[in-house]
């Protein structure tokens, strides 16, 4: 994958430089202090295509990487003092706005990839299962920063759909899908966050039963 390769190259360069330059835990006193994009002050190790930002204790906070040489970072790896980044932001089309966000665990395993459908921050998330396959897709369809639709996947197929239809922040519809067919649905009709109705559907999609659920 393009991003992983780019990151590996950046890390290799950085670690090589740490070995020769005395960084990596020691206060890098000789580095210039700069103001980061977030308004905080950092010590900057400027290597041209990539720039590593350290806090005053020499802990690596983040790395900016300009892969196409247009002077704007298109990869930002957030380390927050850790050897491996927990989050990598990517500007895939080089327009100066980030459009891909990758979350990693402490071992460097990819957990989640977010993308932007509107160009205004993440609004779709692909969550990977322990086997590295997509396990869940989450959508912020109205762009308010909150997820209101989630698909649970099994071997690439949707098996369950969870929807916050009234957008109060709580799921109120749970749909079960089998072989591409809606087989049942549970509803929270009184808004307490608990399902209180269940609908079952027959082969052709006709309603086969309506059940009131005990509380
Ligand atoms: Ca760039
Ligand atoms: Ca972009
Ligand atoms: Ca939303
Ligand atoms: Ca709701």
Image: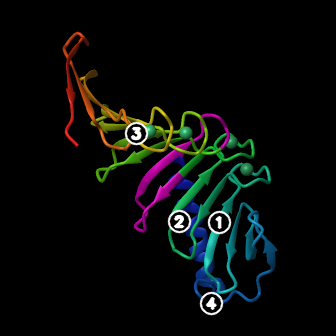
Relative image position of residue 191 (x, y in whole percent):
40, 39
**Residue 56, located in which quarter of the rendered image?**
bottom right
Relative image position of residue 119 (x, y in whole percent):
67, 38
Q: Earlier in the sequence, mark 3 or mark 2?
A: 2
Q: CA gap, disc 4 to disc 3?
A: 55 Å
Q: Quick check: is the Cβ at mark 4 less than 8 Å away from ligand 1?
A: no
Q: Which mark is residue 191?
A: 3
Task: Give the mark toward the camera: 3 or 1.
Answer: 3
Q: Quick check: is the Cβ at mark 3 less than 8 Å away from ligand 4?
A: yes
Q: CA gap, disc 3 to disc 2?
A: 40 Å
Residue 116 painted magenta: yes
Residue at point 46%, 59% (across, down) = 104
Relative image position of residue 31 (x, y in whole percent):
76, 82
Residue 139 painted magenta: no
Query: Which element type, helix, strand or loop, lies under badge 2?
Result: loop
Q: Which mark is residue 63?
A: 1
Query: Answer yes or no: do the residues labelled 1 and 2 have beta carbons within 8 Å?
Result: yes
Q: Nearer the viewer, residue 94 or 78?
A: 78
Q: Which mark is residue 26?
A: 4
Start-end of magenta stretch: 102-120
Q: CA gap, disc 2 to disc 4?
A: 19 Å
Query: Residue tagged by mark 2?
Result: 85
Q: Earlier in the sequence, mark 4 or mark 3?
A: 4
Q: Is residue 27 left or right of residue 162?
A: right
């Amino acid at each position: 994958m393009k991003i992983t390769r780019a990151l590996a190259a950046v890390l290799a360069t950085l670690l090589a430089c740490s070995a020769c330059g005395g960084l990596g835990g020691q206060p890098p006193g000789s580095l210039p202090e700069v103001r980061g994009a977030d308004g905080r002050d950092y010590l900057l190790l400027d290597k041209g295509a990539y720039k590593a930002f350290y806090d005053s204790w020499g802990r690596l906070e983040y790395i900016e990487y300009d892969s196409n040489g247009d002077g704007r970072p298109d990869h930002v790896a957030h380390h927050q003092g850790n050897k491996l980044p927990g989050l990598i932001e990517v500007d895939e089309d080089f327009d100066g706005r980030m459009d891909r966000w990758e979350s990693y665990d402490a071992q460097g395993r990819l957990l989640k990839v977010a993308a932007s459908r509107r160009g205004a921050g993440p609004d779709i998330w692909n969550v990977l299962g322990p086997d590295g396959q997509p396990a869940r897709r989450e959508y912020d369809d109205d762009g308010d920063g909150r997820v209101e639709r989630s698909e649970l996947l099994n071997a690439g197929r949707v098996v369950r759909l969870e929807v916050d239809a009234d957008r109060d922040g709580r799921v109120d519809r749970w749909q079960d899908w089998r072989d591409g067919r809606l087989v049942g649905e549970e509803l929270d009709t009184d808004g307490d966050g608990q399902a209180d109705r269940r609908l079952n559907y027959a082969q052709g999609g006709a309603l086969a039963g309506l059940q009131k659920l005990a509380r």
